[in-house]
Image (cartoon, rainbow, N blue to C red):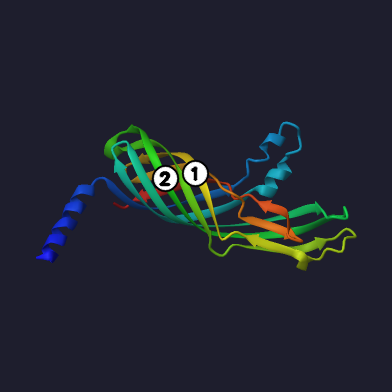
């Protein structure tokens, strides 16, 4: 009798959410660029070289679920993001010697955005235009920093003294907009999150790789 009761409850639940719950897969392009230095553009201290040093390109893929409440919806996602960035860093040590080194960054994270959205234009099954925002949990899934080709400039600093600091997890916030057409979704978002990747010398940070990201993704609603 209990089995019949639970089966009936399950069927009732499925029939209730049918047409309200979407499940799908998605993939897209990820580009990181910090906005904290943009105020320096006006005085000329933030140049294209500064942008090139901060920019990294990557790829993400994963799954999502969307629970619709008329024009509102909640969309949790599970995404794997990967990317690489190679660039040269210059800095002055405590003795005012100028040093430089090549930095090789491998980005590998598991991201869990939980988005709350609003359908500005809702054409039902044909599609919609949406805005969205919500928190994102980001976990390190094998990211690494490597240093090569140190030019010490008379300093006693060695490559072995440069330390990698990759945070295990960070909490950020996403905002963006999206369009649905039939079973396809297209989103553009910006994630504001603390830097996950730092280089340290004598336990002092000398270089941060921005973790803020622009994300463009294409999804397919399987259900």
Q: Residues within 10 Å of mark 2 (few under 14, many from 20)?
A: many
Q: Is residue 18 visible?
A: no
Task: Locate residue 150 relative to residue 83 in the image: left or right.
Answer: right
Q: In the image, is residue 130 above or below residue 52?
A: above
Q: Which label's residue is closer to the chain start, 1 or 2?
A: 2
Whether pointer 1 and pointer 2 mark residues with C-beta atoms closer than 8 Å, the reply is yes
Seen as rendered, the residue at the extreme right is 154
Residue 163 point in image, percent of width and height: 71, 63
Seen as rendered, the residue at the extreme bottom is 160
Q: In the image, is residue 185 above or below residue 129?
A: below
Q: Quadrant of residue 45?
A: top right
Q: From the image, which quarter does the N terminus lie in? A: bottom left
Residue 185 point in image, percent of width and height: 39, 44
Front residue (pair 103, 115): 115
Which residue is denoted by mark 2 in the rendering?
115
Residue 61 point in image, percent of width and height: 46, 56
Front residue (pair 10, 60): 10
Q: Measuring 39% from the left and 50% from the top, which residue is drawn there?
A: 76
Which residue is denoted by mark 1 in the rendering?
174
Residue 102 point in image, percent of width and height: 74, 59
Q: Is residue 47 visible?
A: yes
Q: Measuring 58% from the left and 47% from the top, which residue is drawn there?
A: 212
Task: Locate residue 27 relative to residue 66 in the image: left or right.
Answer: right
Task: Locate residue 38 relative to residue 16 in the image: left or right.
Answer: right
Could you tell me which secondary element the residue under label 1 belongs to? strand
Q: Measuring 65% from the left and 59% from the top, which residue is drawn there?
A: 105
Q: Measuring 56% from the left and 54% from the top, which residue is drawn there?
A: 58
Could you tell me which secondary element the residue under label 2 belongs to? strand
């Amino acid at each position: 009798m209990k089995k019949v009761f639970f089966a009936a409850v399950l069927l009732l639940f499925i029939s209730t959410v049918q047409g309200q719950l979407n499940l799908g897969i998605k993939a897209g392009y990820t580009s990181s660029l910090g906005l904290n230095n943009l105020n320096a553009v006006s005085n000329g201290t933030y140049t294209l070289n500064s942008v090139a040093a901060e920019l990294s390109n990557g790829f993400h893929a994963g799954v999502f679920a969307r629970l619709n409440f008329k024009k509102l919806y909640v969309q949790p996602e599970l995404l794997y993001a990967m990317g690489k960035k190679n660039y040269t860093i210059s800095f002055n040590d405590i003795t005012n010697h100028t040093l430089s080194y090549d930095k090789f960054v491998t980005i590998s994270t598991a991201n869990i955005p939980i988005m709350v959205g609003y359908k500005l234009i809702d054409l039902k099954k044909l599609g919609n235009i949406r805005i969205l925002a919500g928190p994102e949990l980001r976990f390190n899934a094998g990211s690494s920093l490597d240093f090569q080709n140190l030019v010490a400039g008379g300093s006693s600093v060695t490559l072995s003294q440069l330390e990698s600091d990759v945070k295990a997890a960070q909490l950020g916030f996403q905002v963006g907009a999206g369009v649905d057409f039939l079973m396809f979704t297209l989103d553009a978002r910006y994630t504001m999150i603390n830097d996950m990747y730092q280089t340290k010398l004598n336990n002092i940070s000398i270089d941060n790789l921005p973790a803020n990201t622009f994300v463009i993704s294409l999804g397919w609603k399987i259900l």
